């Protein structure tokens, strides 16, 4: 029998009706003669609700406790989906991450899967059961419950598929991967295929349709990932190995990341120890620094600017408060309401005129950006939220996305 992993996201499980409808889709897959593992997220906006609930208790929550709290969302989904499948006369069994043997390592709320003891899942598949696994969670070597970071159910699904050596189908509220988030640019085109490398860039730059690590695991273990609608049976998008035919399109898509904050630490005495100290402390607090730049020295002082996402803002403020005690003259400026818009395409590697075209498009549309950065296959701009839609539409038109 061929195994298949299906994953359903929160919006696809947001109500009892939706869970019942997912149960039918799972059974449909089983009826095709496949061994089915289903990975589920928490229902609807449950995880956001739990995060907000914790904030009502404290703004300084212990991350171990956060993991205990956040993992409960997925536990509800596995039980309900398993009940719905059993109710339709099929044999399902539900597993939390711990029960499914998902081993993790790292810091609480940002754990990584290091191994899956897959034999247990295999045994139940052999018995003909549909195995329902909680996404987004695992257990560390201390025996503590851990979570994988927001959107982490995708990672659970692809990691299980890698272990089983099978395909992973990600079912969601959009019917495939588009050149641009269709909620931001409704003219965006659905892609038939996208390479792992391009999808990794798109996801890491803000295209939340797939979690970045999930695609990285897919790339590493060559797991075909298919992204499609959880409500309709229409063709979706394959994320797969780069093929020659994909080369035709130089630019594949635009990724958008909202809720970007730009922190400027001004009047830092130019002294490599000061800069090292700031960056080091941010690293120790697990802050993901994105774009970073340093102004040229003036009277022996420099300004250091970097961007972070909303989730890391509290940790950044904590570090700044500490450093201020050491470097007293420092001036801090935090800019909010910023977005990052990134143009992505493997073909950019060989076409140096592309970057010039992007700058021209933004200039012709009077869009100013605060910072920009490039990689081999992407160019990113930090700009005011209010300019985001115009910038995206202009770039999409230019590159026929
Ligand atoms: P799930 O709850 O199923 O995990 P997500 O909300 O994580 O779903 O991902 C689906 C959403 O990703 C879509 O509703 C869509 O707005 C957004 N998205 C962002 N970029 C893209 C893109 N390039 N193509 C398709 N959807 C995208
Ligand atoms: N429930 C978690 C979240 O909302 C994990 C996931 O949906 O993939 O981030
Ligand atoms: Mg998701």
Image: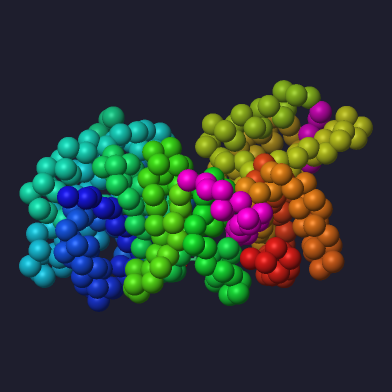
Task: Report x, y in % for residue 110.
Answer: 43, 42
Q: Was residue 258 drawn as part of the magenta stretch in this picture?
A: yes
Residue 329 in sight in this render: no
- Name the quarter where the C terminus is drawn: bottom right
Relative side of 20 to 299, left or right: left
Vertical position of residue 324 compared to residue 82: above or below: above
Residues drawn in magenta:
241-270
Residue 253 in sight in this render: yes
Relative side of 48 to 249, left or right: left
Task: Report x, y in % for residue 378.
Answer: 66, 48
Instruction: Count the marks.
Output: 0
* Residue projecting furthest to the front: 245
**Nearest the camera: 112 or 21?**
21
Q: Please report the residue visible at 81 percent of the width from the left and 28 percent of the height from the top.
A: 270
Q: Please report the residue visible at 48 percent of the width from the left and 46 percent of the height from the top.
A: 241
Q: Please report the residue visible at 52 percent of the width from the left and 37 percent of the height from the top.
A: 286
């Amino acid at each position: 029998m061929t195994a298949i992993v299906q994953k359903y996201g929160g919006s696809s499980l947001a109500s009892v009706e939706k869970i019942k409808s997912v149960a039918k889709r799972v059974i449909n897959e089983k009826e095709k003669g496949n061994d089915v593992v289903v990975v589920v997220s928490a229902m609807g906006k449950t995880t956001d609700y739990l995060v907000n609930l914790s904030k009502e208790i404290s703004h300084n929550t212990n991350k171990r406790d956060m993991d205990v709290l956040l993992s409960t969302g997925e536990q509800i989904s596995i039980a309900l989906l398993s009940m719905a499948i059993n109710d339709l006369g099929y044999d399902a069994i539900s597993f939390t991450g711990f029960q499914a043997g998902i081993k993790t390592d790292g810091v609480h709320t940002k754990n990584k899967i290091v191994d899956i003891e897959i034999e247990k899942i295999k045994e139940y598949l052999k018995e003909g059961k549909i195995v329902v696994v909680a996404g987004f969670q695992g257990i560390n070597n201390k025996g503590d419950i851990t979570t994988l970071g927001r959107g982490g159910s995708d990672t659970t699904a692809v990691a299980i598929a890698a272990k089983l050596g099978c395909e992973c189908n990600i079912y969601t509220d959009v019917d495939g991967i588009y050149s641009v988030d269709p909620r931001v640019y409704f003219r965006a085109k659905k892609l038939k295929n996208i390479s792992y490398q391009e999808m990794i860039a798109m996801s890491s730059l803000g295209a939340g349709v797939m979690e970045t690590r999930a695609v990285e695991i897919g790339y590493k273990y060559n797991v075909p990932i298919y992204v499609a609608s959880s409500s309709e049976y229409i063709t979706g998008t394959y994320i797969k190995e780069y093929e020659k035919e994909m080369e035709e399109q130089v630019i594949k898509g635009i990724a958008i990341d909202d809720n970007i904050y730009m922190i400027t630490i001004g009047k830092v005495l130019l002294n490599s120890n000061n800069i090292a100290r700031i960056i080091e402390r941010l690293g120790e607090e697990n802050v993901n620094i994105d774009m970073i730049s340093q102004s040229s020295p003036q009277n022996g002082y420099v300004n250091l600017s970097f961007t972070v996402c909303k989730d890391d803002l509290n940790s950044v403020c904590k570090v700044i408060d500490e450093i201020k005690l050491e470097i007293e003259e420092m001036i801090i400026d935090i800019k909010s309401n910023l977005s990052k818009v990134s143009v992505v395409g493997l073909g950019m590697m060989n076409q140096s005129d592309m970057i010039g075209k992007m700058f021209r498009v933004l200039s012709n549309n009077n869009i100013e950006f605060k910072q920009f950065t490039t990689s081999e296959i992407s160019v990113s701009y930090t700009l005011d939220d209010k300019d985001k839609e115009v910038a995206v539409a202009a770039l999409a038109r230019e590159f026929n996305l």
